[in-house]
Image (cartoon, rainbow, N blue to C red):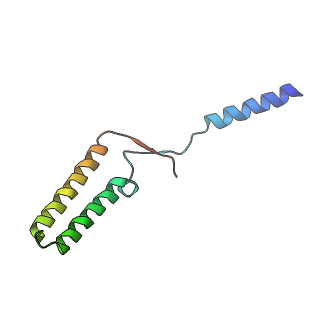
Amino acid sequence: MASVETADRDRVRKDSASTPRMMSLEETKPSYKTTELLTMLGIVAAILIAAASADNFDAPRAWTLVAVVASAYMVSRGLAKSGSRHVDTDR
């Protein structure tokens, strides 16, 4: 009796081990799941608030800084996507 139960248990383990799992192999996480996006949005908001409230911080300088921050974000996302793999098991 015990050998039949052991054989059934081993068969179940083999069957469950051989079934393929659904996994998504994307290159990186989506941008909205990263802290980089939230950091960039916070910095842009801080720059624009500082430009609106400070007298010696004019609009062209503020928008130049916003462009620099956005460009740095794009470069960082590009570096993150350069060949690294992300396995999404949340699905």
Q: Is residue 22 visible?
A: yes
Quarter that holds the N terminus: top right
Residue depicted at x 22% and y 49% = 75
The quadrant holding residue 46 is bottom left
Compared across the picture, whether 60 is left or right of 33 comes to: left
Q: Is residue 50 above or below residue 74?
A: below
Compared across the picture, whether 16 is left or right of 65 comes to: right
Q: Is residue 38 above or below residue 75?
A: below
Residue lying farthest top? 3
Q: Is residue 81 visible?
A: no
Q: Nearer the viewer, residue 74 or 57?
A: 57
**Image coordinates for residue 43, horizontal then vertical, percent:** 26, 61
Q: Nearer the viewer, residue 19 or 67?
A: 67
Residue lying farthest front? 55
**Image coordinates for residue 20, horizontal then vertical, percent:** 57, 40
Q: Nearer the viewer, residue 88 or 32?
A: 32
Count of numbered tags:
0
**Image coordinates for residue 28, horizontal then vertical, percent:** 37, 46
Residue depicted at x 19% and y 74% = 53
The quadrant holding residue 17 is top right
**Image coordinates for residue 24, horizontal then vertical, percent:** 46, 46
